[in-house]
Image: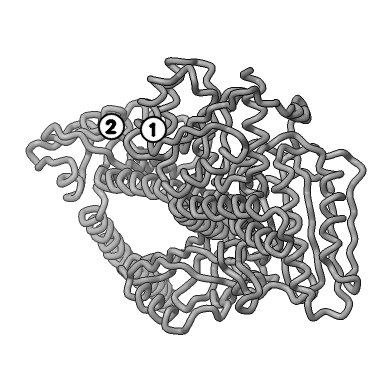
Amino acid sequence: MNEQTLIDGLKDRIAILESALNQANRVQAQWQHASEQLRTAQGSLKESRDRFLALFEYATNGMVVANTDGDIQSMNAEAHHIFGCDQASLPQNVEQIFPAYPQIMSEFQVRRQRVRSSLITHQDEASMLRCDGAQLTASLSLIAIVVAGKNLLLLSVQDITRQLEERERHQGERQELQLTIANRASRLLKLSQALDAAMEPVVICNTEGVIEYVNPAYCHMWGYAPSEVMGKPTSLLKSNQHDNELYADMWERIMAGGVWEGRLINRCRDGQLKAVSLSISPVFDRQGGVSNFIGLYRDLTQQEYMSKQVLQSQKMEAVSTLVGGISHEFNNILAGMTGNLYLAKMLYPNDEEMMKYLDSAEQQGFKAAEMIQMLMVFARKDWVEEKVLELNTLIQETCTLGRLSIPENIAFSVDVCEQILMVRADTAQIQQMLLHLVQNSHDALRHAQHGKISIQLKSGTGTADFIAQSSAVGVRHYAQIIVRDNGIGIREKDKTHIFEPFYTSKDTGEGTGLGLAAVFGVIERLGGTIQVDSKPGDTQFSIYIPIAVADEAPVAAAKEVVDVEQENQPFVILLVDDETEVLAITSKILSSLNYKVIEARNGLEAMRYYEDHSDSIDLVVTDIIMPELSGIEAVERMRCIRESLPVIFITGYDQEYFEQQVEEDEKTRLVLKPLRIGELSKIIRQMLAEDA
């Protein structure tokens, strides 16, 4: 082996050694790099593990790691706190904390098999038992994890007991609030329905007086549609009938939180004025401030109408008292006057000049008596003979009489319906009523160039409002008499007074003020009603008289009076009156009629005389109101002696009142002072003839 070969061998070995060395260096470098990577991975793993442990330990939820059998491996501090345990009292199995854990796990396994996921979560609310025995409710989440090839469960626990209590409390509050809202909504609905259904008009406005609500009754009263008043000021109804001071006082009071009540006259949509009672109350907000006002109206039309009727009735009662007080004395004076005039006429039967003056004076006396009777008619103190009569013929005959007093330049028309209308009334009073109205129309046409008076009779049926105002209860069918003229009309200020006695709008000396008062009295007595509509050029009086019921029939004519010739001995009349002058004059008159008269100054004196001379007395003529013993009481005692004693009662008082105490028959008559001698003579002859 040569040296070169040896050198080449060495070179090859050196090359192999260098290659092995280089390879070793490379392996070392790779190892170092791998070691570096390992150290880096270990650092990251430690960092990740530390982070997990930190998250696990300091999580806000309780965290528990358990195996698939439920054995607890570890738990964080929050879990210790929630479960109420320390390391020494740590539960061994999840079921000790959650009694329903087996059921929860069963559901979890079913879910896991169905989903087939390596990471399965399950959340449920479960009853939890603390180590101290307290029972709470927890929100439980289960997560399947794999650690070091082991299947584990991570349980996340949150105590939600307080949350559930809060939720239940909030739910209770919410339900209570919902119930309160529902109740308030129901109340508001009921209030709204009640306001809409209320018969009284209601308006609600804000503090500026702008209308926000009106009910149907409000619209009905004032004639507006809701859309016409919503958003409009309440002054929409102002009538300018009140001064601004009234409204200022009203607003001052309600803005201060007070209630205002008062009477107003407002204007309807059609311009008609209406009297109402208004009550305004404030509505307060939660802070106690005034937010709105509610106003309630009450229609005073009917009430004020009734008040006027009551006032009119009181006036009539006052006049009635006045008439009742003066009529007796006044009629006694007239009885003396007319009696003396009758006797004077007997003294001068052939002196025509004297008879003319005496007749005139007698007529004036009886005219004064008629005036008293007119007052008594108004005061409902007259005595009338009511009977069922045919109104058609009576109206035509009375209009024929009334036409005679109307100048020919005034057109006069009469329209009487064909239907026969029967009413219960007194003929004279119907005539008197109609003639007064005709005369009233004549006076209204005094300065008219083309005057017209029309009289119409027709039948009618009263409306509900009319029947309510009528004094005839239960009557629906009426005879309607309309007297109309085109005269000057009735002034507005006079309309409420025209039926008052002694009230007249005519000049002094042109009227007594009793005509329309007498008309009113007649109509009221008959249970009727009178209505007046008047404006310049058109005045209408409408009179409604109840139709007589079907079973009433006209009264038969009175029995014809037969004159009786006196026998040789004259009839004896016991005359009783406490007025000396009336007693003397009446005695002379009866004596002039060939009767023997026995005078007595009062009932007691007459009774004593009759007790001693009852067989000689044929007839008693007695006043009623007398001192010591009244005429009625005296006659009652006399008839204890002789039951069939004929008696004529005479009075200057209210004959209608005494008619209730004196029952008239063939033995008893009632006559009003002053006496008309001819009528008295007929009555006496008739009663004596019937007693003969």
Give the percent coordinates (x, y) of residue 311: 49, 58
At horizontal 55% and vertical 77% (from top left) the residue drawn is 235
Left or right of 96? Residue 635 is right
The residue positioned 53% from the left and 75% from the top of the image is 210
What residue lies at 27% left-to-right and 42% top-to-bottom? 65
The answer to whether 45 appears left or right of 669 in the picture is left
CA distance separating discs 2 and 1 = 132 Å
> In the image shown, does 692 or 447 lie closer to the viewer?
692
Within 10 Å of disc 2 (Cα), the crowding (few <14, some 14-19, many 20+) is some
Q: Secondary structure at mark 2?
A: loop
Badge 1 crowding class, 10 Å Cα cut-off, few under 14, some 14 to 19, many 20 or more, is many
Marks 2 and 1 in Cβ contact (< 8 Å): no
Rendering coords of residue 238 (x, y %)? 56, 77
Q: Is residue 358 left or right of residue 620?
A: right
Q: Which residue is mark 2?
A: 70
Is residue 441 among what the camera can see?
Answer: yes
Residue 254 placed where, x, y %? 37, 72
Q: List x then y, in percent, for residue 91.
A: 16, 34
> Which residue was labeled with disc 1?
603
Q: Nearer the viewer, residue 90 or 462?
A: 462
Q: Which mark is in front, 2 or 1?
A: 1
Q: Please, what is the three-letter code of the amino acid marked with disc 1?
A: Gly
Q: Quadrant of the N terminus?
A: bottom left
The answer to whether 324 appears left or right of 495 in the picture is left
Callout 1: helix, strand or loop?
helix
Quadrant of the drawing holding the C terminus? top right
Q: In the rendered structure, which amino acid carries the disc numbered 2?
A: Gly
Of residues 364 and 373, the one nearer the viewer is 364
Residue 348, quarter of the rendered image: bottom right
Up/down of 517 relative to 62, above or below: below
In terms of sequence position, does the residue under pointer 2 or pointer 1 come before the other? 2
